[in-house]
Image (spheres, grey):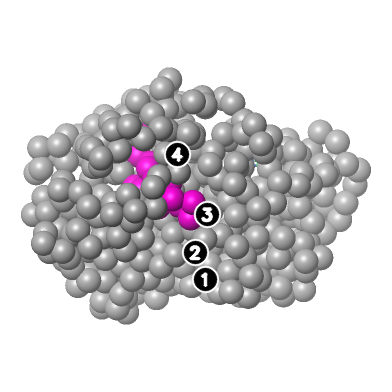
Amino acid sequence: MTSTNQTSATNPGHAPSWYAHSANDKRVRESLKGEHTADVCVIGAGFTGISAALQLAENGFKVIVVEGERIGFGASGRNGGQIVNGYSRDLEVIARRYGPDKAAKLGAMSLEGGNIIRERVAKYGIQCDLVDGGFFAAFTDKQVREMAHVRANWEKHGHTGLEMVSKAEVGKYVKADRYVGGMIDRFGGHIHPLNLVLGEAAAFESLGGQVFEKSRVTGLDMGANPVVRTAEGSVKAKYVLVCGNAYLGTMLPKITDKMMPVSSQVMATEQLDPKLIEELLPANYCVEDANYVLDYYRRTADNRLLYGGGIGYGGQDPANLTGVIRPNMLKTFPQLANAKIEFAWSGNFALTLTRIPHIGKLADNVYFSHGDSGHGVTTTHLLGKILGEAVAGHAERFDVWASLPAFPFPGGKTFRVPLTVLGAWWYGLRDKLGV
Ligand SMILES: Cc1cc2nc3c(=O)[nH]c(=O)nc-3n(C[C@H](O)[C@H](O)[C@H](O)COP(=O)(O)OP(=O)(O)OC[C@H]3O[C@@H](n4cnc5c(N)ncnc54)[C@H](O)[C@@H]3O)c2cc1C
């Protein structure tokens, strides 16, 4: 069993995940040395950074991506791989808070992230085990009613892929008797996320883009031509895109005080008998449950069960990575009592107070996007594209997102984590009580 601080034995510099182990491309790119120039310099080679870089390269920009560790080192190479449409806050909440006009504009983009993934997979022949279909599992009748309500609202925004599932039909998607019903999203799905971002990075490189790995950005000089600095090199650019998300550290406090790193843990079983895994998840849809601190799981292409859950505010990992998620997996699938856990890892996503991504400008030529708040596989693809559009002079969609307010977490450095834990505890308690 692996622990958090270890890196992958077969793919150094990555977390010890099943993804790092089964990555299609294990080449280490060179690190940034000496002085470079580019139209655009992107900090961070996760989904956001690579999505923006690819969008720009496709439109003829000279782009350099500077990554502190490896491509997909952060959340993008460690997540559950679930293509979840929409945002971490439902469109109805967005309408209530920011008005129906904003909700309509965001609603019109809410399936685009998944479409971008599918288009790029097809266009560049990316091998990332793409499978269609997602299932939201409900523990209570109240959660079923909430899903039905969400579905009705989403349909108004043009999402025609949602369908309610009765208790009797749950077994078509997941063989577990914990659930009382649920909802499927035919436009959801799952992927091997590290292979997706590696494939997108390779597509970007095929268009002349450059990615430097093991090159942590330690300084950013603002100005007419901002300069990104690492220990051994620099990139002078016309534009800089900051896409470091939960791994950015304290380099840019103006934006990082509006985001909190939160960890989630994932594990993968040994390869299971194909008959058994097909029985557990017959439709090969990914599953996430409806609790506030949710479990998410799916099949892998090599017949493992990949199961995630747990949460650590402030980006703290539990001492025992499987301590919470293995018991949860066994509550869902007691059939797996004897299945060996071969991989376990943890990763950080960036949470905002509003649960809405935070996009904006630090200067006229320095843009940022972070804070997808747990549902980021699709949103990062959308927002990366939107960053690219803004640099190319089409900022209409960027402006919609940038107009949404972002707030620092209450409690300052000392109390922001305990206060958030308290809030989450309250919602977790409501889930446990089924209220
Ligand atoms: C365990 C886990 C499970 C998840 N499961 C799902 C899921 O199933 N579905 C879903 O929709 N979402 C999921 N998410 C959320 C999703 O993975 C993220 O929202 C998304 O990947 C964020 O992408 P990103 O590019 O913004 O950030 P990241 O992928 O974290 O990339 C940021 C990159 O920037 C680099 N970086 C940071 N600072 C610097 C610097 N100073 N210099 C150079 N480089 C720097 C980092 O090394 C990193 O590679 C999950 C997240 C986690 C952690």
- Mark 1 highlights which residue? 118
Marked residue nearer the N-terminal end (3 or 1): 1
Q: Residue furthest right?
A: 34
Badge 3: how crowded within 10 Å, few (<14), some, or many (20+)? many
Residues in magenta, as a range: 296-314
Distance in Å between CA atoms under marks 1 and 2: 8 Å
As measured in the structure, the alpha-carbon distance from the residue carrying label 2 to the one carrying label 3 is 7 Å
Nearest the eye: 412 or 5:
5
* Distance from Cα at disc 3 to Cα at disc 1: 13 Å
**Which mark, by number, is residue 362?**
none
- The amino acid pointed to by label 1 is Arg
Task: Choose mark 3 or mark 1, whichever is in front.
Answer: 3
Q: Answer yes or no: do the residues labelled 1 and 2 have beta carbons within 8 Å? A: yes
Residue at 83%, 44% (x, y): give it.
30
Other-residue count near label 2 (Cα within 10 Å), few / some / many at <14 / 14–19 / ≥20: many
Which amino acid, mark 3?
Answer: His
| Image position, residue 190 (x, y; %) | 44, 59
**Residue 95 occupies which quadrant of the picture?**
bottom left
Q: Earlier in the sequence, mark 4 or mark 2?
A: 2
Specify few, some or many for label 1: CA neighbours under 10 Å numbering under 14, 14-19, or 20 or more.
Answer: some
Residue position marked by numbered label 4 in the rendering: 270
Could you tell me how far apart the alpha carbons at marks 4 and 2 are, in whole angstroms? Answer: 21 Å
Instruction: Return the residue at label 3.
Output: 192
Q: Left or right: where does residue 58 sit relative to residue 274? A: right
If the image is split into quadrants, where does the C terminus sit? Answer: top left
